[in-house]
Image: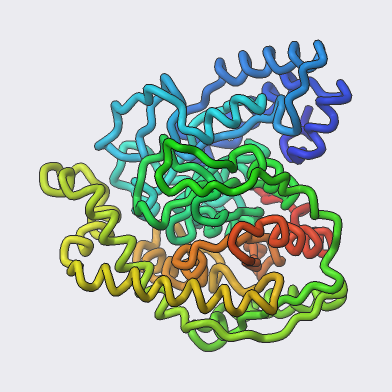
C-alpha cells in the first residue's frame, strides 16, 4: 500500500485492468496519504472521500464484469476549484463564491466520470486563477512539497502540490498565462497547455475568454497524454471549442525524436530575460540530449518576450475586468488584496489598446506558424528561476513575471513542461516544449523522449 502513492496512471491502469490492483485499495491508500500529508501542504480545499470510495467500488465491479472503459478507469483525480462538479461547491478560492454550489458538471468533469475516473476532491487555487498565494482568505494557500516554505506556482497551486506529493496521480488545472505550466515547472511535473479550443471550458470559472485553457498535471508525460485524450474534444457548450478530430495522444510517444527538427529559443532566457544559471544550463542540456537522441536542434528567434507579455497583459486584464466588474464595484473588500490589485488595472485599459493587442496577436500567430513550417517543435525555458519563499510577497510578485509561458497563451499553440533537473538546493528545474497548433502528439513525443532519457520524474519531494 505504501508504494501506491507514486504509481503512475499508466502503470496503475494496466494493473487495474489485469486485476493486480484494486481501485478500492488505490483510493484508500491515497486517502490515507492525503490525511497524513496534506496538513503540511493545504493542497485540498475539500476531500471527497465518500465519493471516491463509491466511485472506486463501482469501478471495481464494472471491471470485474468485463466493462473496462479505458486507461482512466479506476484512476483517482482531483479538480482545481474553478471546475464544476455537480452538487459540490466551486469556490474559486474566494469569499465571493464561498456558497456557490454547481448544478451540473463541467464538460471535463463529465468526461472524466464517463472514463471511470475516481473523484478525490477540490484543489486549492490562487483566487479566481489570478491572485497570488494569499494569506487574507478563509483558506490558506497551497505550499510546495519540495520545500514547504516556498510557493508551488500558480494559479493551479493545489493541483501541482497534490500531484507532486503523491496525493493524486493526476489533476486538472487551468492555464491563462501559464497557470498549469508554472506549478509543473517548480514542482517537477508534466503539465500542458493544450491548443486553444482543444479542451472545453464549459463549467469552468472564466478569467479571460480568449486565453483560458484547461490542462492536466501529472508526474509523467504518458500520464499527461492519457488525461488529455480523455478530456479533449469538441463541445457546443463552449463557443470557442474547436471542431478538432479526437486523438489518442499516446499514439506517438515511443517514436523517439530521430529525424525531427527542433528550434531552441535561447534568447527568451539569455537576452530577453536572464534566467537562473542552473535553469539556463538545464535547457541547453535538454537540447544536447535531444541531439544525442537523433534530433536536429538549432537556435531560432521569435518576437521578444516583452512583446508577448504586453499583448497577454492587455488582453487578459481587459477580459478579466469584464468578468469581475460588478463584484469589484460592489464587493471589492471581499477579494484578497493580491487579486484586487491584479484585476483593477483592467478598468483603465482603453478599447483601442485591446483591439490593437488582438491585431498584434494575429501577427504573432502567423509568425510562429511560418517558423513551424521548418520545425516540428521548439524548446525553451518556462520559469526563469525556482520557487521563492511563499511569505515573501515582493519576491513572489517579482518572480511571477520572470517566465516564458505567455507566448504560447497569446498564440494559442500547445506547450508542455517537463522536469529538467534540480538546482543546488534541490529545487526543481524545467524545460518547455511547444509545437504546431493541434499537434500535441508531437509535443508529447519530444517530451517523452527527453523524459525517458533523463528520468528526473523518478525523484520525489522530501515531504514525508
Identify the residue at image location x=81%, y=25%: 16
Residue 254 is at least partly visible in this image: yes
Foreground of the two, 389 or 247: 247
Foreground of the two, 127 or 102: 102
Identify the residue at image location x=55%, y=71%: 385
> Does residue 34 appear to the left or right of 420 in the view shown?
left
Count the marks: how many? 0
Name the image quarter holding residue 6: top right
160 over 304 or under it: above or below? above
> Does residue 126 appear to the left or right of 53 in the view shown?
left
101 over 326 or under it: above or below? above
Name the image quarter holding residue 125: top left
Identify the residue at image location x=76%, y=59%: 445
> Does residue 36 appear to the left or right of 235 in the view shown?
right
Foreground of the two, 350 or 374: 374
Name the image quarter holding residue 32: top right
> Residue 188: horizontal and vertical position, in percent?
65, 56
Residue 464 is at least partly visible in this image: no
In the displayed image of the protein, which residue is found farthest to the left?
A: 330
Foreground of the two, 151 or 110: 110
Query: Which corner quadrant holds the N terminus?
Result: top right
> Residue 343: horizontal and vertical position, in percent?
25, 57
Query: Which corner quadrant holds the C terminus?
Result: top right
> Does residue 206 appear to the left or right of 409 in the view shown?
left
198 over 410 or under it: above or below? above
> Residue 395: horizontal and vertical position, in percent?
40, 68
Identify the residue at image location x=43%, y=49%: 240
Amino acid at each position: 500500500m505504501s508504494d501506491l502513492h507514486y504509481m503512475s496512471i499508466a502503470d496503475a491502469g494496466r494493473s487495474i485492468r489485469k486485476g493486480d490492483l484494486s481501485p478500492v485499495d488505490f483510493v484508500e491508500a491515497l486517502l490515507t496519504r492525503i490525511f497524513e500529508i496534506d496538513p503540511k501542504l493545504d493542497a485540498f480545499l475539500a476531500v471527497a472521500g465518500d465519493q471516491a470510495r463509491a466511485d472506486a467500488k463501482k469501478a471495481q465491479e464494472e471491471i470485474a464484469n468485463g466493462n473496462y472503459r479505458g486507461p482512466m478507469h479506476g484512476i483517482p483525480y482531483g479538480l482545481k476549484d474553478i471546475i464544476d462538479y455537480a452538487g459540490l461547491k466551486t469556490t474559486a478560492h474566494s469569499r465571493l463564491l464561498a456558497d456557490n454550489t454547481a448544478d451540473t458538471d463541467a464538460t471535463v468533469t463529465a468526461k472524466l466520470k464517463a472514463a471511470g475516473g475516481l473523484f478525490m476532491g477540490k484543489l486549492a487555487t490562487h483566487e479566481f486563477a489570478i491572485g497570488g498565494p494569499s494569506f487574507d482568505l478563509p483558506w490558506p494557500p497551497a505550499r510546495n512539497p519540495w520545500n514547504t516554505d516556498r510557493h508551488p506556482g500558480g494559479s493551479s497551486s493545489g493541483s501541482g502540490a497534490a500531484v507532486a506529493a503523491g496525493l493524486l496521480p493526476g489533476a486538472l488545472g487551468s492555464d491563462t498565462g501559464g497557470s498549469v505550466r508554472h506549478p509543473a515547472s517548480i514542482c517537477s511535473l508534466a503539465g500542458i497547455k493544450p491548443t486553444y479550443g482543444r479542451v472545453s471550458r464549459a463549467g469552468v470559472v472564466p478569467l479571460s475568454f480568449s486565453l483560458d485553457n484547461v490542462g492536466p498535471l501529472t508526474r509523467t508525460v504518458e500520464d499527461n497524454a492519457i488525461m488529455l485524450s480523455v478530456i479533449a474534444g469538441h463541445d457546443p457548450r463552449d463557443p470557442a471549442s474547436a471542431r478538432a478530430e479526437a486523438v489518442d495522444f499516446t499514439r506517438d510517444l515511443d517514436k523517439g525524436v530521430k529525424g525531427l527538427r527542433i528550434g531552441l529559443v535561447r534568447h527568451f532566457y539569455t537576452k530577453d530575460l536572464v534566467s537562473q544559471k542552473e535553469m539556463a544550463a538545464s535547457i541547453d542540456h535538454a537540447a544536447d540530449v535531444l541531439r544525442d537522441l537523433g534530433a536536429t536542434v538549432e537556435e531560432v528567434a521569435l518576437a521578444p518576450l516583452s512583446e508577448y507579455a504586453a499583448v497577454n497583459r492587455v488582453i487578459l486584464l481587459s477580459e478579466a475586468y469584464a468578468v469581475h466588474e460588478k463584484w469589484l464595484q460592489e464587493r471589492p473588500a471581499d477579494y484578497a488584496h493580491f487579486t484586487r490589485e491584479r484585476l483593477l488595472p483592467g478598468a483603465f485599459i482603453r478599447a483601442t489598446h485591446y483591439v490593437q493587442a488582438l491585431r498584434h496577436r494575429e501577427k504573432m500567430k502567423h509568425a510562429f506558424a511560418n517558423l513551424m513550417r521548418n520545425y516540428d517543435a521548439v524548446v525553451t525555458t518556462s520559469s526563469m528561476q525556482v520557487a521563492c519563499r511563499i511569505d515573501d510577497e515582493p519576491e513572489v510578485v517579482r518572480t511571477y513575471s520572470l517566465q516564458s509561458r505567455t507566448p504560447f497563451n497569446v498564440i494559442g499553440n500547445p506547450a508542455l513542461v517537463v522536469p529538467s533537473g534540480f538546482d543546488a538546493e534541490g529545487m526543481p528545474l524545467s524545460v518547455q516544449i511547444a509545437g504546431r497548433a493541434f499537434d500535441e502528439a508531437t509535443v508529447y513525443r519530444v517530451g517523452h523522449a527527453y523524459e525517458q532519457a533523463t528520468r528526473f520524474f523518478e525523484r520525489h519531494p522530501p515531504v514525508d
